[in-house]
Image (cartoon, rainbow, N blue to C red):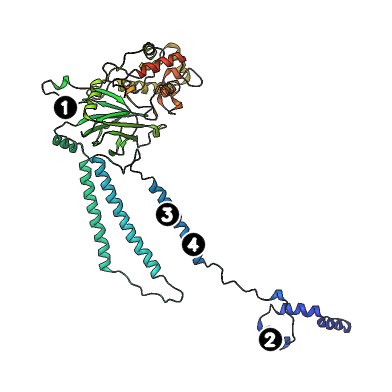
Amino acid sequence: MVRAASEILHTRRSPSFRRIRGFTMGLLPSAEKDSPTNSETTFVPESSRAIPVSNTSESPTRRSGRRSLVALAILGGILALAALGCDANAHQSTFGVNGPVAREQLLLFNVLLWTMVAVFVLVEGALLYAAIRYRRKPGDPLPPQTHGHTPLEIAWTIIPTILILGLGIWSVVVLFKLEPGEAIALAKEQGKEPLYIEAVGHQWWWEFRYEDAYPDHDPSKPAEEQMELITTANEMRIPVDRPVIMTLKSDDVIHSFWIPKLAGKQDVVPTRANQMWFLAEDAGMYYGQCAEFCGTAHAQMKFRVHAMPEAEYKAWVDGWGGDLAEPMSPEAARGRLVFLGDGQCVTCHTVGTADQVNEVGEGVQHARMQTYIAYTQWLSKRAEERLEDVRTGNEPPTAFAAPNLTDLADRTTIGSGLVDLNRETLRQWLRNPDDIKPGNRMSELAAIYQTRLDHRADLSEEQLSDLVEYLMAQRHLPVQ
């Protein structure tokens, strides 16, 4: 016991014990360190002293503000990029409009847009001002609590109501101006007749039918003798400064007819005929597009509108379906045999005349569509039954509604406005339409594309060249 006590006493007096004791005492509360029992001087190591906290560390408020600035910068960049896309001269811009219909729609859009922008800025501005100006600061007491402010509540109820009623009434007035009756009244003021065109949406191209392509008749002749029936595809020709009334139909699925610079969108619905009108004040090319998803090649269902001076339009009407601008070459004559024979093009396409339609809208294209429906029903039969039908010759034909090619060489594009029309692109299209327009019906249904594994046309290079020459000969206007 004496020896143990002596060792403990010796240890407590050693320098190393004092350093350890000093370190531990530096971690104890001040009351304990200042107690009488610990009055002995101790050594506190340098490393045990309190480390000062830097006053330059970023506060949560400052970090939040910096994140807000970054978010605003990103939002500003997105808005700037969006503004760069608002080019009034772009082909399908709704800002560089032409004609009374598109102009009226643009005015309505701008008034609605900037009214909403003004309301947004006022409301959000007041909200941000109140949030910043009257934000609660440390030590502030709870502000007085108010419940309701009758004059203010009446004001912010009446003002939006008046605003919405005014805009709503104006919108209805604009809708009435878009009715075909407005076009008829405008044409009478001009001393003209409106031009009636029927647009039929197909997967994935547009058919245009003119029941009377030049409505200003010679009074000395019966009107029925002067009727100019025209059927064309993907490129519509109209005279400037004449109201055009469109009747919109579909023979398969829902489409949407849209010429951004001339008029807004109008749905094209099967079993229903919708109408719209527009007027082109300036000659030029206007670009259209199907604006309703309608299947695989929806994005490639384009069309064009050629607005022409009255004299040029009448020359096109008079020449359509008549004598060719140039006599057929020997190659073109051989190509005609390919068109009627090995190519089997005549099964779906018409050349030289309009596609006739009866009083209820049924005609050549309707019959082709019914044939296609029957063919798709046949495909639903069991494989053994289809094989037996093929063996016995009872396989149904595969005709399908397809563009009229009477004025093909007078057009500027092929594939529903996808590529410029020339001999090279036409040859590429005939060899394999999928190279230009994936998902088209021609590759899917035409017999000459079903016999080869690569789905190319089962025609020789010479036959393709002759067919190209025949189709490029279908020109009725002088080469410009």
Mark 2 neighbour density, 10 Å: few (under 14) some (14–19) many (20 or more): few
Which label sits on residue 385? none
| Element at label 1 | loop
Q: From this view, report whether residue 34 is shown above or below residue 324.
A: below
Crowding near the residue tagged with mark 3, few <14, some 14–19, many ≥20 C-alpha atoms within 10 Å? few
Look at 33% across and 41% down and name the residue there. 89
Left/right of residue 396 with respect to residue 257 in the rendered view: right
Residue with the most extreme front position:
480
Q: Which residue is mark 4?
A: 66
Q: Residues within 10 Å of mark 4 (few under 14, many from 20)?
A: few
Residue highlighted by disc 3:
76
Asked if residue 342 lies left or right of residue 31, the reply is left
> Against 366, is 284 above or below?
below
* Label 1 Cα crowd, 10 Å radius (few <14 / some 14-19 / many 20+): some
Tag 4, which secondary structure? helix
Q: Residue lying furthest bottom in this view?
A: 36
Circle nearer the N terminus (2, 4)? 2
Q: How far from the left and from the top, in percent, is residue 363?
A: 27, 21
- Amino acid residing under circle 4: Arg
* Residue bearing the label numbered 2: 34
**Which quadrant, please, contains the N terminus?**
bottom right
Image depth: mark 3 or mark 2 in front: 3
- The amino acid type, in three-letter code, at marker 2 is Asp
Snapshot quadrant of residue 379? top left
Report the Cα–Cα distance between label 4 and label 3. 15 Å
User: Mark 1 and mark 4: span between their CA atoms?
Assistant: 70 Å
